[in-house]
Amino acid sequence: MSRIKEIVKATPLLGDVARFIGKYRTRVPAGHFYSPIVSVDEVRKREDQIYPAPPRTLPGLDLREEQQVALMKTFAASYFPSVPFTDTPQDGFRYYFVNKYFIHADATTLHCMMRHFSPKQIMEAGSGFSSAVMLDTNERFLNQSVKFTFIEPYPDRLYSLLTPADRRQTTIFEKTLQDIPVEYFEKLEENDILFIDSTHVSKTGSDVNYFLFDIFPRLKPGVIVHVHDVFYPFEYPKAWVIDGNGRFGWNEAYSLRAFLMYQDTFEILFHNDFLQTFHADWLAENMPTYATRGRGSSIWLRKVK
């Protein structure tokens, strides 16, 4: 058998095919019970269990609904009326709503968070259109007072949105989050923001493991944390998992939910999708574009102690 493999690899066309297949070979096939890749057939069997009507409470997890609603109402009264962004690019702005990566509800929440908490530093892991929101908000509402660090191993999109001055005035690491020493994040102070848009996969050596196990425990009290693509109730949308025909293996939301259960070190400040689910009528009346322009998937936390 080994001799046959050698012959195949030595044959130009067959060798290329064999190497291509070998590149994507895994110990078990996608959908196998040992694989993190979803089996659509298995999900369909338990679809009603996995995707029931969203519960308003979750065992072991304080959603802090009253406090979330209070912050939402503050945003609506104080900041939402003057959100400056438009659907398409406009002169003098980096960000615009109609993009594939960071859309209306998430961008509006980030803008309001910055104006409400006035951070002195923002460190972002996973940069692009969210960075554009930050820079525009800092420039127009915070008197250029925020110091930015962008951590992005694939920075083409980020660079396409930055001005020459942005490149000079911000710190950019073209690295993965795991390549940044954990001590770097100890610089963050109360009301500063750690903004994470990760690979969304918990596995050996991943960025998700790094921020949950190494960075979060070292943050100072009062630091605010954002994690992206976390839908309520910490489950990925059916359209992604089933209608996307499987091959879906994100698991960050499950790890984050487990991290937040039965503890009082971090608290939930704001969860877009939760509020859009249970306060849709209020949002439609008071923040209409927020309510109708797509689901937000940002969850905002605060280190308490």
Image (cartoon, rainbow, N blue to C red):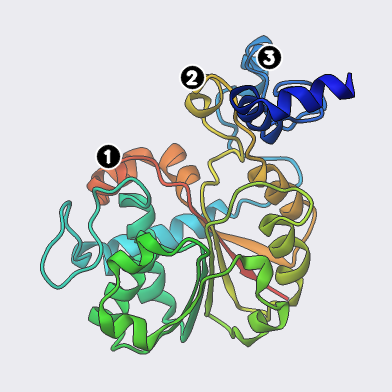
> Above or below — where is 299 with respect to 53?
below
Asked if residue 28 shows in the view, the reply is no
> Could you tell me residue 141's position as x and y percent?
26, 80
How many angstroms separate mark 3 from mark 2 (CA)? 15 Å
Answer with left or right where residue 174 lies relative to residue 43: left
Q: Quadrant of the C terminus?
A: bottom right
User: Residue 279, located in which quarter of the rendered image?
Assistant: top left
Q: Amino acid at mark 2?
A: Asp
**Cβ–Cβ below 8 Å for labels 1 and 2?**
no
Residue 195 place in picture, x, y as percent: 52, 66
Q: Disc 3 marks which residue?
A: 46
Going from N to C along the chain, the mark reached first, 1 or 3, is 3
Left or right of 220: which side holds 293?
A: left
> Image height check: is 132 above or below 250?
below
Identity of the residue drawn at 60% across and 30% down: 248
Q: Earlier in the sequence, mark 3 or mark 2?
A: 3
The type of residue carrying mark 1 is Thr
- Residue at the spot 48% in from the left edge and 61% down from the top edge: 154
| Distance (Cα) linking label 1 and label 3 | 30 Å
Residue 170 or 273: which is nearer the viewer?
170
Kind of residue at disc 3: Arg
What residue did someone put label 2 on?
243
Secondary structure beneath dot 1 equals helix
Q: CA distance from mark 1 to mark 2?
A: 22 Å
The mark found on residue 164 in the picture is none
Picture layout, residue 142 above or below residue 210: below
* Contact (Cβ within 8 Å) of mark 3 with mark 2: no
Q: Is residue 57 left or right of residue 272?
A: right
Which is more foreground, mark 1 or mark 2?
Answer: 2
> For the residue labelled by badge 2, is the local secondary structure a helix, a strand or a loop?
loop
| Residue ID for mark 1 | 292
